[in-house]
Amino acid sequence: MYASRRSALPVVGPSVAGLSAACSCVLSAMPLRYNSLLTKILPAARQLGPLPATALCAVLALAAGLYGAWSGEGGRALAATLATFAIFLLVMLLPASRGVKEQIISRVGSGAGILLGVTLFLAYLIYVLGTNTFALARVAAVLALIFVPLALAISAEGRPSGAWQDFAIAASVWVTVKFSPAHWFWPYPGGKLSYAFTVLLMVNVGLAAFLLTRRLAAVGYSIDWGHRWGLYITSSFLVFGCVAIPLGFATHFIQFAPRWSSVASLPLAALGILIFTAWPEEFLFRGLLQNMVSQKSKSDLAGWCVASVLFGLSHITNAHFPNWRYVLLATIAGLFYGWTWRKTGSMFASAIVHALVDATWHFFFRTL
């Protein structure tokens, strides 16, 4: 998914029998143990520290500021927008770094989620006041987007993972990103940052609800690396490509059309895909949904399949409605992302596979 919120190579009219055979062959080779929450996971050997995470946030905010100035923006409006962006990005990155989440919980306790929610709301006030876009209805709507999910999370405290409140919160995050009037929430500058800001806000709401309030286990919300992870990431990406690309060509839906003129911007585009598409979607569909369904049903297979199907269905409105062929390809992609997440126990690993798929599509192919 790039710019238009797509997440897997599209396809039209695949052969069901051929697809079933291909998937059976591929998935049977994947050593995932079913019906158990004790699937062998290759643990991380290294994790990003808080200082590098902060430095990364500063570099990205600086780059955004330079781009804004180059685009002709400036003054208080640009400063307020950059401040909000930096706060949102830092809130998203720090819990993924070593020891930060544990320190927040140990020092703040049960109020950690509420504290984060207040921080997000104050950051939004900086944005609307600094850009002269304050409106009572707008501020009230954002207040609800932040604190209604938190209220649901608080009401579920003490209940096992997979309470109805958990699924309601996850649904609210997805619906907000997918269907909310993002341009109305983020009118400056001309709505250009509306999608990115909405994604950052709702990911952080999810962190406040699930990591700090509900304290959901095994989310894998970390930027880390482990032994043989490169092998699993590479194999997941390549095998999915072997399934998706031939199907796209056979159905005359994709065409090989590399954008050589934009090769210099590919690294930056790939980073944007990782931060604003792959990471948020892996948090929702793997770290939360696959995780919660697996724990609720006590079956890795159930969580893996349900999350993959829901991931596919989330693409039903892409390009046109109902886009069942897109749903099918995104479901297959979800199986590969979900397998990578379970094998590594890290969202970072599955997000890399996800970003590789999206960046490859963005650069090498176009939809017919």
Image (cartoon, rainbow, N blue to C red):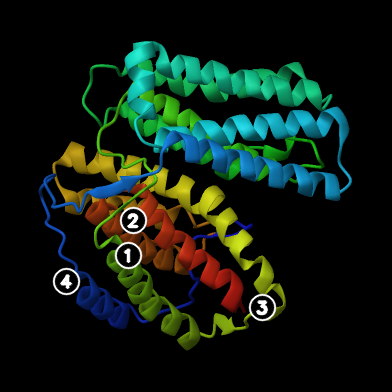
Q: Dot 4, how many residues are within 10 Å of its Cα: few (below 14), some (14-19), or many (20+)?
A: few
Residue 18 coordinates in the image, percent (x, y): 30, 83
Point out which mark residue 230 bears.
Answer: 1
**267 left or right, relative to 81:** left
Q: Earlier in the sequence, mark 3 or mark 4?
A: 4
The tag earlier along the polypeptide, 2 or 4, is 4
Give the residue type at disc 4: Ser
Left or right: where 142 falls relative to 304: right
Q: CA distance from mark 2 to mark 4?
A: 16 Å
The local secondary structure at tag 1 comes to helix
Callout 1, which amino acid?
Gly
Report whether 354 appears left or right of 155: right
Element marked by disc 3: loop
Residue pointed to by mark 4: 28
* Image location (x, y in percent) of residue 291: 27, 42
Q: Residues within 10 Å of mark 2 (few under 14, many from 20)?
A: many
Q: Quadrant of residue 221?
A: top left
Query: Around disc 3, counting alpha carbons within 10 Å, would you say few (fewer than 14), some (14 to 19), or many (20 or more)?
Result: few
| Residue beneath disc 3 | 259
Reply above or below: 17 against 75: below
Q: CA distance from mark 3 to mark 2?
A: 30 Å
* Marks 2, 4: nearer the viewer: 4
Give the camera-side residue of 141 and 233. Answer: 233
Tell me the kind of residue under disc 2: Ser
Residue tagged by mark 2? Answer: 308
Q: Earlier in the sequence, mark 4 or mark 1?
A: 4
Q: Residue at x 56, y 61 (%)?
A: 270
Q: CA distance from mark 3 to mark 4?
A: 36 Å
Q: How many marks?
A: 4
Point 26% across, 49% down: residue: 45
Q: Earlier in the sequence, mark 3 or mark 1?
A: 1
Q: Secondary structure at mark 2?
A: helix
